[in-house]
Image: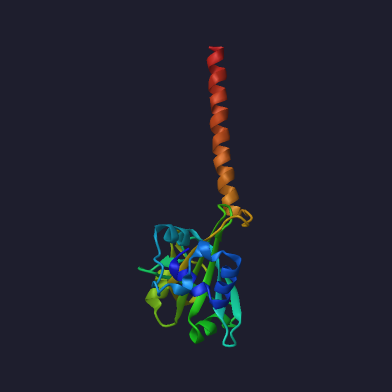
Amino acid sequence: MGERYHQIAYGPHALARQRRAGSHVVYGDVGAQSDSGPDELGDRELAFLRSTFQFHLATVTDGGWPYIQYRSGPRGFVHHLGGNRIGFADFHGNSQFVTVGNIEDNHRVALFLADYPQRMRLKLFGHATVVDDDDQLLDELATVPDGRVSARAERSILIDVEGIDWNCSRSLVPQYDRDYVRELNQANARRVAELEQRIRDLEAGERE
């Protein structure tokens, strides 16, 4: 967990609870620390972001309520745009514009990303921006390693990451999507074919 993530997440009430429970020894006295600046996106975080095909995005309503939406796309739909900035093409939805409206009112967002087969999860805090009028940027974000996103993209959403936390995998239940199972089956099928060929070769050698 990065220092900046601590500083954003741990308010005075959380810190008071930590002190009463004794867990502040583990996490450090965040209240006494100066602002460390954004946690840096490293190779591990960037590899995880590029491989993801889904995440949950939390914004804040003008009444102060958290609002969570699910975002998905082909692997590679989350792009690294340099430094601590990531972005993705926002697809056509139900035209409620709650997330977009929240970002335009309050730029603070949180992302929750999980790789369920590998039991890995990453949490991010950041400042988001909605970009409606940059066709070149939208075209870049709609491009993925296998071609282009098939869904209609309406705008770009950029996020400047502030805090990073690799969450504990202890309580994350493994889940397997269709592509993951297909890859496993293909690998098993190749292995079975190799073993069957070895058996045929051995049997042929015994007959000679």
Q: Residue at x 40, y 64 (%)?
A: 41
Q: Residue at x 42, y 61 (%)?
A: 46
Occupied quadrant, residue 172: bottom right
Q: Residue at x 57, y 45 (%)?
A: 184
User: Where does the image place residue 199, in percent across and percent down from the top left?
Assistant: 57, 24
Above or below, comparing residue 189 to residue 40 in the picture: above
Residue that protrudes farthest toward the left in the picture: 82
Of 173 and 47, nearer the camera is: 173
Q: Is residue 142 visible?
A: no
Above or below, comparing residue 112 to residue 132 in the picture: above
User: Where does the image place residue 138, in percent across and percent down from the top left?
Assistant: 42, 74
Occupied quadrant, residue 143: bottom left
User: Where does the image place residue 52, in percent across and percent down from the top left?
Assistant: 51, 61
User: Where does the image place residue 16, in percent across and percent down from the top left?
Assistant: 57, 74
Q: Is residue 203 visible?
A: yes
Residue that protrudes farthest toward the top in the picture: 208
Please say which color scheme the image uses.
rainbow
Q: Judge left or right: residue 181 versus residue 51.
A: right
- Counting every numbered tag in the picture gives 0
Of 109 and 76, nearer the camera is: 109
